């Protein structure tokens, strides 16, 4: 699959078969994540890999009961290290760059999962304080996304995208 095909065919997957995902596959996904661009090459991302059912369940509950999360064999919680970005770029680093950098890493993960024939979903709706407590995330590190990863048990139709005409602005907005 070339990069354009992968970008086009990636879908948010919210149903998984019981089949496991290997540690090698997870490493490949995180290898893709760590090659994302980041402001000043600070790489302010941290990844929490969860396989234990009781922790997945708690995380799913903290994510407004999105129960498909706990059905995935692996759940990765991606965090932004605000201190790392803030140490060089101050408040812009803490509030913007570390989130943008982490988002770039997440997209690489989703594309890598798709290229491996796996399914994943970017879950952003969750109670941050709850997730922080469950996963013992220290101050200065912010949980940004929950990514369940597994073998897809669904093939969703592509949701509509805004057309190029709608989003392109020439010279000025
Ligand atoms: C920042 C962000 C937060 C999201 N949060 C959720 C979520 O909490 N639950 C969910 O099921 N999908 C979530 N999604 C997935 C979107 O619903 C999905 O990407 C969008 O509908 C387009 O579908 P596609 O990914 O299949 O192209 C989120 C996506 C992003 C980028």
Image (cartoon, rainbow, N blue to C red):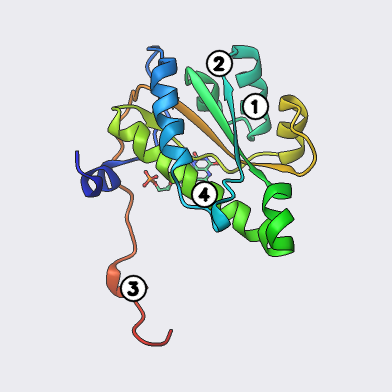
Whether the residue under disc 4 has CB within 8 Å of ligand 1: yes
Taking the spot 55% from the left edge, 47% from the top edge, the residue there is: 102
Mark number displayed over residue 103: 4
Q: Quadrant of the C terminus?
A: bottom left
Sequence order check, earlier mark of 1 and 3: 1
Q: How many angstroms separate mark 2 from mark 4 (CA)? A: 22 Å
Sequence order check, earlier mark of 1 and 2: 2
Q: What is the count of numbered marks?
A: 4
- Examine the image and state in which quarter residue 54 appears: top right
Q: How many angstroms separate mark 3 from mark 2 (CA)? A: 42 Å
Mark number displayed over residue 59: 1
SS class, disc 2: loop
Q: Residue 141 location, x and y as percent?
A: 72, 41
Please give left or right for residue 50 compared with residue 110 in the image.
right
SS class, disc 4: helix
SS class, disc 1: helix
Whether the residue under disc 1 has CB within 8 Å of ligand 1: no
SS class, disc 3: helix
Q: Which residue is mark 2?
A: 51
Q: Is residue 76 above or below residue 43?
A: above
Please give left or right for residue 164 compared with residue 121 in the image.
left
Q: How many angstroms separate mark 1 from mark 4 (CA)? A: 20 Å
Q: How many angstroms separate mark 4 from mark 3 (CA)? A: 24 Å
Q: Nearer the viewer, residue 7 or 63?
A: 7
Select label 4 or label 3 by which is in front: 4
Sequence order check, earlier mark of 1 and 4: 1
Select label 3 or label 2 by which is in front: 2
Q: Is residue 165 above or below residue 49?
A: below
Residues at discs 3 and 2 in contact (Cβ within 8 Å):
no
């Amino acid at each position: 699959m070339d990069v354009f095909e992968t970008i086009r065919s990636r879908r948010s997957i919210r149903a998984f078969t019981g089949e496991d995902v290997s540690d090698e596959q997870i490493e490949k996904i995180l290898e893709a994540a760590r090659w994302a661009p980041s402001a000043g090459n600070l790489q302010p991302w941290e990844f929490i890999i969860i396989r234990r059912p009781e922790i997945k369940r708690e995380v799913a509950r903290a994510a407004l009961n999105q129960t498909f999360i706990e059905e995935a064999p692996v759940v990765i919680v991606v965090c932004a290290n605000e201190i790392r970005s803030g140490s060089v770029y101050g408040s812009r680093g803490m509030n913007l760059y570390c989130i943008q950098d982490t988002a770039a890493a997440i997209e690489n993960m989703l594309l890598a999962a798709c290229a491996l024939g796996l399914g994943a979903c970017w879950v952003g709706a969750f109670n941050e304080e709850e997730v922080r407590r469950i996963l013992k995330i220290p101050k200065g590190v912010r949980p940004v996304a929950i990514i369940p990863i597994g073998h897809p048990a669904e093939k969703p139709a592509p949701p509509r995208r805004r057309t190029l005409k709608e989003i392109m602005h020439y010279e000025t907005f």
